[in-house]
Amino acid sequence: MALQGSEEKLAEPEEVGDEDVSVSPAEEITLTVGPEGEEDTDPLLLPWDRFSAWLHCICVVGFDLELGQAVEVIYPHHSKLSEKEKTSICYLSFPDSNSGCLGDTQFCFRFRQASGRMSSLGFFLDQFDRDAPVCLKRDQGHYYGYVYFRQVRDKSLKRGYFQKSLVLISKLPYVMFFHSLLKLIAPEYFEKQEPCLEAACNDIDRWPTPHPGKILTLPIMGTVMKVRIPTCYDKPGTSQLVQSTQNDNLVSIVLPTIHEVDLFMCFHPVFFHIQMLWELVLLGEALVVMAPSPAESSDTVLALVSCISPLRYCSDFRPYFTIHDSEFKEYTTRTQAPPSVILGVTNPFFAKTLQHWPHIIRIGDMKQAGETVKQMKVKKLKNLKTLDSKPGVYSAYKPYISKDEDIIKQLQKGVQQKRPSAAQNAILRRYFLELTQSFIIPLERYVASLMPLQKSISPWKSPPQLRPFLQEEFMKTLEKAGPQLTSRLKGDWMGLYRQFLRCPNFDGWFRNRRREMMKKLEALHLEALCEEDLQLRVQQHTEVETVDLVLKLKDKLTQAEREQLPLRPGTLTKLQAHIDSVILSLPDDLQGILHKPSTP
């Protein structure tokens, strides 16, 4: 939400009817073909740059009787992975033996990136991140692994089973998109092996880059996928339809979402406690999900992380975590309090190892969304003996907000009436969105008040500073402008805010808002400069001062372009014209020097 630097108030979210659907005027991007039948390419992009915008690499992980899990293939072959990263991928790409996953299984994991590696595409990729919602920005310190695991009986093998995983490694959290992509690539790979992988990678390297707000047409192995990546400007909670066009006769798959898991399906076993789970995630509490398979584990962890959207979950989360993970000792030690992290596990060993964790969610086999779930009380942690314990939430946590019985009744009624899972998911997603918005609006309103008034911005002084965030001052604003204005729920909202202000989610949110506001201040300062009569000022100052002004204006121009400041259209053009006119007022020798482009 852009701040205007004046006394303007932040707009509160509007009521959205069930039938409301927002369709962004998106620009459709397909592969353009030149007169010779060859694809036109961006001259600035080298081979594999387009591939790297979507994926880091593709790995094939197999099972060797002597070596255990091993990375058999990395494609493209020039892709770099450290030995530690390869080890992580090996162990995380296979379900635990107790999961008994016969056939094909899909899930995802997340692991730390080795330190010290810099991408040559950093600035190029940053421009796409700029317009992405916070939950869809590239993960700076971690990789996602999207897995398609196949285990089938094969008497010709000593082990008696064929076991192999095809894994997509990416910085992008597009879980539904990459799972859909794997459904197209993996079965073909298992049948035709590496030539098929090479063909898929070459297809991906011809894709347009993942630009938020654009409708992308993506050919892959004879099939065409059509997707739209959301932007930070989309209205939260509304669907961004990918509209059909006359050329869509070649499109095989249109994805309604690239990242949203089915919340109702994931929370169905524990939906009597969804509000408490929302609080635990909001406050960055240590949470472990114990599930029978990596698919259920990873989906549930991703559902938990997304339930506070549009807030970004700023702590660590591992959709699938194993005892071989490099952070295993760090996260399971009893010598200190459990860290702010959400872990998804399947190995029974964790029932004992993580018994000291304060909040444990035990997920049984995922029931069909049409089956009735009995109401369960929150169980005491001492009752959790093994992973075979009954499904439920094991915690001593007392929620700050009173339970919302209406949403429980609404979802139960949907189950009884066999309401489609997609409709149940939409109801639950909207409920979480409204709950999070009710909580965050008072913070947004207070933070907006920290912005200096626009009239205090002088073009010839440094931009004014933001006022500091004072917790007690904010808490006082809740008496008249708290969540009671938008939420009917009662409870200790003040206590919830006090706890939130101490957690990583607040720190991450406030850093981001502060960065946005500083950029807005810089933009307003630059716009004020552009409105000044610089020729008149030059006449009143010495030659040395004029040269100093030119250098400062050039720095401002470079900063505005580098940081993509939120400027009014035409501001940069006007600033460049000002710089040129001031330079022309100087002697010829100085003009020659100042007209040279500044080195970054």
Image (tube, helix red, strand yellow):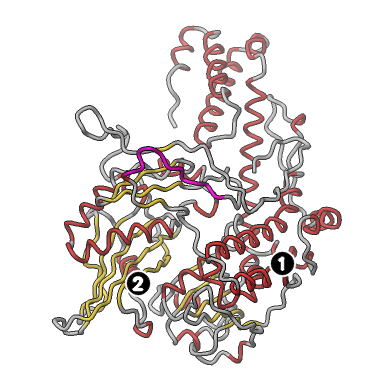
Q: Is residue 66 above or below residue 203?
A: below
Q: Position of residue 225 (x, y in %)?
A: 35, 49
Q: Is residue 32 above or below residue 423?
A: above
Q: Residues within 10 Å of mark 2 (few under 14, many from 20)?
A: some
From the image, tell me which residue sits under label 1.
Answer: 499
Horizontally, residue 40 falls left or right of residue 549, namely left
Which corner quadrant holds the C terminus?
top left
Which residue occupies the foreground of this view, 235 or 522? Answer: 235
**The image quarter in which residue 94 lies:** bottom left
From the image, tell me which residue sits under label 2.
Answer: 105
Horizontally, residue 372 falls left or right of residue 349, namely right
248 in magenta: yes
- Give the residue type at disc 1: Gln
- Give the residue type at disc 2: Thr
Q: Which residues are magenta?
A: 239-249
CA–CA distance between discs 2 and 1?
39 Å
Classify mark 2: helix, strand or loop: strand
Which residue occupies the foreground of this view, 130 or 532? Answer: 130
